[in-house]
């Protein structure tokens, strides 16, 4: 597979106080029996600087404002207020230039004609994009190769799987070689193998220098793909950094995972333990009371499960790693063999949950 570099890498994405308000008519009535109107702020003063050639992830729950942001940046809807520039063009005053500079893959789109083949679909869109007829055939072959559909190009789209149709949508977005790509939840609804293939393709496009804005609520996907991520919550941008940067600056809890099993026989290292400790060793004993006794007075929570006689206990909270020496000593004293003790860095998902939870708490203060 060959990825063709974007024709113009000079354009990033810049927004300042970008806002979109929807006016919704309610079935409830106010004075004079007229339908009441209410405002929904879908995107609230969003300010972003996405560098040329960057793969930036916009993360948020369903309804957070991700798709509305993409729709404004791709000129499908106008912002209520604020400004946005894509590839150097204003999304309101220079909408045609913006559209010529972007490629979009939107969720659930049905832009292809299912009774036509993939190649015929791309010929249609090449004409819509105004591609030079002399260049059209070569470019269609290039994008089909990029998305690994060359060998299925002359089959009707109605026979394509969901993953193949999504790759065809990406081929269409690349036809006119735009510098900027908007990928709105591109792997949503795909099976594991199709999603993995599409992520691999997105990585290669990013390496080729395209500016990519990817929206997703799949945090593992964002962690794998993106150089930086922004977290959007109820229309507001609440954090921007690299995944590693977010981990370092967040107050996300330490996670310590302990795996242990109860010692048996007469020659275990617990042989010299106090009688009170030996009494603790019952066939159905759990290490949780021991661990929770060590953590007593801290903010650290311990939860565990058992399988085939082995316990896995997860300790989560500020400074959990500092308790490891005391935890291991207490477990040994009470007749537990330590199989493994590992410190896990908070994942992007842990950070996301914490940041959005903090925002919820702040909203109710």
Image (cartoon, rainbow, N blue to C red):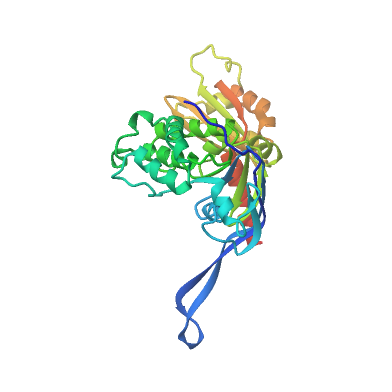
**Left or right: residue 52 compared with residue 135:** right
At x 33% / y 47%, what residue is drawn? 113
Q: Is residue 308 above or below residue 95?
A: above
Picture coordinates of residue 68 (x, y %)?
Answer: 53, 56
Q: Is residue 166 above or below residue 21?
A: above
Q: Where, by quadrant of the figure, is residue 234 drawn?
A: bottom right
For the C terminus, which image quadrant? Answer: bottom right
Picture coordinates of residue 121 (x, y %)?
Answer: 37, 43
Looking at the image, which residue sits at the far front? 134
Q: Where, by quadrant of the figure, is residue 345 drawn?
A: top right
Residue 106 visible from this viewpoint: no
Picture coordinates of residue 244 (x, y %)?
Answer: 66, 34
**Left or right: residue 162 compared with residue 265:** left
39 or 122: nearer the viewer? 122
29 or 83: nearer the viewer? 83
Q: How many marks?
A: 0
Residue 89 visible from this viewpoint: yes
346 or 47: nearer the viewer? 47
Looking at the image, which residue sits at the far top? 267
Picture coordinates of residue 163 (x, y %)?
Answer: 38, 37
136 or 57: nearer the viewer? 136
At x 47% / y 83%, what residue is drawn? 34
């Amino acid at each position: 597979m060959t990825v063709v570099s974007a024709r113009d890498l000079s354009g990033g994405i810049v927004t300042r106080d970008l806002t979109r308000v929807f006016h919704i008519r309610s079935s409830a009535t106010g004075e004079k029996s007229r339908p009441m109107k209410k405002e929904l702020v879908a995107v609230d003063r969003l300010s972003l600087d996405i560098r040329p050639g960057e793969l930036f992830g916009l993360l948020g729950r369903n309804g957070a404002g991700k798709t509305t942001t993409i729709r404004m940046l791709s000129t499908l809807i106008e912002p209520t207020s604020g400004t946005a520039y894509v590839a150097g063009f204003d999304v309101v005053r220079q909408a045609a230039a913006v559209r010529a500079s972007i490629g979009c893959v939107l969720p659930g789109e049905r832009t292809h004609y299912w009774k036509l083949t993939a190649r015929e679909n791309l010929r249609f869109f090449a004409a819509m994009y105004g591609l030079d007829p002399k260049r059209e055939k070569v470019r269609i072959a290039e994008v089909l190769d990029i998305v690994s559909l060359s060998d299925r190009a002359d089959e009707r789209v109605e026979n394509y799987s969901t993953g193949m149709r999504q790759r065809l949508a990406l081929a269409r977005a690349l036809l006119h070689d735009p510098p900027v790509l908007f990928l709105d939840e591109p792997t949503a609804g795909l099976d594991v193998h199709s999603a993995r293939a599409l992520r691999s393709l997105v990585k290669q496009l990013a390496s080729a220098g395209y500016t990519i804005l990817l929206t997703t609520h799949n945090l593992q996907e964002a962690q794998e793909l993106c150089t930086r991520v922004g977290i959007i919550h109820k229309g507001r941008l609440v954090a921007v950094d690299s995944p590693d940067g977010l981990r370092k600056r967040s107050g996300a809890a330490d996670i310590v995972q302990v795996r242990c099993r109860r010692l048996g026989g007469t020659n275990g290292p617990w042989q010299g333990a106090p009688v009170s400790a030996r009494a603790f060793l019952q066939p159905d004993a759990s290490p949780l009371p021991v661990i929770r006794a060590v953590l007593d007075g801290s903010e650290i929570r311990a939860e565990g499960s058992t399988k085939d006689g082995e316990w896995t206990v997860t300790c989560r909270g500020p400074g959990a790693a500092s308790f490891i020496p005391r935890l291991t000593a207490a477990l040994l004293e009470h007749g537990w063999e330590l199989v493994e003790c590992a410190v896990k860095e908070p994942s992007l998902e842990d950070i996301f949950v914490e940041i959005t939870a903090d925002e919820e708490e702040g909203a109710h203060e």
